[in-house]
Image (cartoon, rainbow, N blue to C red):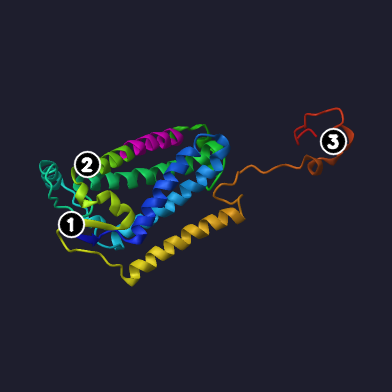
Amino acid sequence: MKRIYIWSLPTRVFHILFALFILLVFISSEEDRWLAYHAIIGYAILILLMFRFSWGVFGPKYSKFKEFPMGKKNVKEFLNNIFEDKQKYIGHNPLASYVMISILIVCFFAIITGVLAYGIQEGKGIFAYLNSSLFKEMEIFEEIHEFLSTLFLVLLAAHIGGVISDRILHKKHETLNSIVTGYKMSEKEEAIRLNIFQKFIAFIFLALLVSFFIFNIMKPDNVLIASSYKAIDYEKQNELFVSECASCHTLYPSKFIA
C-alpha cells in the first residue's frame, strides 16, 4: 500500500471550518441574547455550503459529486465486503456519500428556514418585512427549522459513526488521519493535484468568508441581522406633550389624539 494525496487543502479547511461553525451555531441557539451571533454564523455556514457545492462540480477527484459511488449496486457491494481488509473506495464509500449529500442538503434548507423564521418571528434580517404581514402569526418556518436541525444532528451522528467504524475495521487505510493530513493509504496511485482554476475558486470563497466577518465587525447592525423596528424619539415627535404633560403622564398618547 502507498500513501497518496486525496484531500486538498481547501477540502480540509472546509471540513474544519464547517465542523467548528456547526458547533458554534448550536451553542449560540441556546440563548435569545446570542441570536444575532447565531444568524451571523448561519450565514457563514451558507458561504461554506456555496463553496462545497461549487467544489462538488469543479473541484478535484474524490471531492466531485460525480465521483461519489452512489447507487443500489455500490451500496450492496460495500455492505457485503465491509469487513474485508481490502477496500475498493479511496474517497467516500457509498454510505458515506449518501450521508454527506444529505448533510449538505439538510443544512442548506435549515439555514433558509432559519433566515425566514428570523425575519417573521423576530422582525430582523433580510426577511424582516414579513413580520408586518400575515406571515407574522405563522410559526411553520421556525418549526421546520428546528426539525431540520434535529435531522442534521442525526445525520451528523451517522457520519461520526461511519468514521469510527472505518477506524475500527480499516485502520491501516488511515481514513481519519486523511481528514487532517490529506493523505490516505491505498493500493491505487490516483493522487490529486489542484489546477489554477480550482485554486482560484478556493481563494474567492476564502476571501468572501473573511470579508463577510470583517463586514459584520465593522457594521454590526447590517441588513442581514438588523431589526425592522426603528427607535422613536418621542421628544422630537411631540415636543408639546413632553413639555406640558410628560412630567405627570408616563403613557405616550397616540399621534391621532396628541
Picture quadrant where residue 180 is located: bottom left
In the rendered structure, are the residues bearing label 3 and label 2 in contact, judged by CB atoms less than 8 Å apart? no
Which residue sits at x=37%, y=44%?
107
The residues colored magenta run: 141-155
Residue 63 shows up from this direction = no
The Cα–Cα distance between marks 1 and 3, rounded to whole angstroms, is 81 Å
- Of badges 3 and 2, nearer the viewer stands 2
Report the front residue among 224 and 129. Answer: 224
The local secondary structure at tag 2 comes to: helix
Of the two numbered discs 3 and 2 on the same chain, state the one appearing first in sequence: 2
- Kind of residue at badge 1: Ser
Seen as rendered, the residue at the extreme bottom is 196
Q: Mark 3 sits on what residue?
A: 241
Q: Earlier in the sequence, mark 1 or mark 3?
A: 1
Residue linked to disc 2: 168
Type of the residue with mark 2? Ile
Please name the amino acid that badge 3 sits on: Phe
Query: Which label is found at residue 242?
Result: none
Image quarter where the N terminus lies is bottom left
| For residue 139, side relative to residue 89 (left or right) | right
The picture places residue 168, in percent across and down from the top left corner, at 22, 41
